[in-house]
Amino acid sequence: MGEETVRLDREIFQTAASSGVTVLSERVPNVRSVAVGIWVRSASAHEPRPKMGVSHLLEHMVFKGTERRTAQQIALALESRGGSLDAYTSRDTTSFQARVLDADLPQAIDVLTDLIRHPVLRASDLELERNVVLEEINTVEDTPDDQVFDLSYQALWPEHPYGYSILGTKQTVGALSTADLKSLHDRAYFPANCVIAAAGNLAHEQLLDELEKQGWFNAIPGNARPPAPSPATIPPAVRGTEAHHAKDTAQTHIVFATDSVPYADRRKYALLVLANVFGGGMSSRLFQRIREELGLAYAIYAFTSFYRHVGVTGVYVGTQPRTATQAAAAIRQEYAKLAREGLTGEVLAEAKQQTQGQLMLSLESPSARMYRLAGLAVHGEPYQNLDEVLATVAGLTEEEIRSVAAEFFAPERQTVVWLGPEGAR
């Protein structure tokens, strides 16, 4: 069978199987549940423009039936026992997860494997599911605070798949065929292109046994295929531009954004600390200035996203069209101040404490621990236990913070996208 298992921590194990699949698990003994997921390392970042949305459509289509289960049987298999089944497509990966009682782990792995390895992908199902996805695209178009983020990525990477819509467009989704889906399935949904992670009341050996029963470790012909391609070389993001999109909405939605660092870059922690102070809650500078002092917005926050090859960091605000210019100017002032001064002394100490608290609280559930393990393998980040991560945050120096602030929070670096009524400038 040819597996090599290493212990990463007291309750965390990682197995590299000869079939190429990576398996990680964490035992959380004081719960009665297990979260288990399978990540396929192919998604929207690997799509050519005419096939935009094919990864997401395939994620939907596998739920329509497998060689031995109908769509309804898939839905009932875990739900009938109180569990849940979910999936999502991101830029780097397509992911399928189940959350079940610990005793139902075999059933969860059976259902997930069935979905991923044996979907039937019928043309009759495609017509129905295509309409479902077109409605999902309509939903985003009716949700301007979502749509503005799609427009923001498009402004950062106009020519690269990182800037494409994960859902695709009505035109590209309308043109996709079952042949497109089967071709992607053959190319991407095989063991060497997958990461499997689980957390909860389980033993790693038990997880490996169930995966072996489902054929994940078989050296099947063609299994030595190289993993799906990396995204096309990512060009530098477009920086310092503005784009205005007209839409008849009650608010003007504005996103400031720039490319930052990838998931496995240590500067990630400095960015998290800075983003917390900047717009990470009711005590943050943007919330206090834009909402509390100026009364210009209900929703304002900073965000950070980290992908395998790049990150994005920025700010979202929704405000009345007549106050949009004022809000944007005030946000720019806060950017300039943070870029100029960084964080020092007591302010930095409090910001570190806030970030450490969030990191600890974020690992309270088995699902969160499963996501963390999968993230390591998907993004190529070496394992650090929680104490080491907290120590990394604690060890951030004023100089490190200042240099990250000066680089990524410089107002002139931000690409700004406006979505709202004409004339709201």
Image: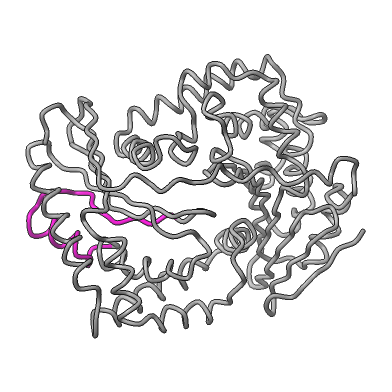
Task: Find the magenta span and give its range.
Answer: 281-305
Inspect the magenta stretch and tell me whether residue 413 lies in it.
no
Which color scheme did the rendering employ for the protein?
Answer: one colour
The part of the image, by quadrant, that contains residue 272 is bottom left
Residue 159 drawn above or below residue 230:
above
Q: Residue at 84%, 52% (x, y): give it.
A: 19
Report the side of 295 relative to 407 (left or right): left
Q: Residue at x 56, y 42 (%)?
A: 232
Q: Position of residue 250 (x, y in %)?
A: 17, 32
Seen at 67% across and 26% down, the residue is 181
Counting labels gives: 0
Q: Quadrant of the N terminus?
A: bottom right
Q: Position of residue 93 (x, y in %)?
A: 59, 46
Instruction: Give coordinates of residue 312: x percent, y percent.
Output: 39, 53
The quadrant holding residue 423 is top left
Residue 269 falls left or right of residue 216: left
Whether residue 296 appears in magenta in the rendering, the answer is yes
Please state if 345 lies on the left or on the right of 91 as rendered. Answer: left
Give me the residue at 89% from left, 49% from top: 218
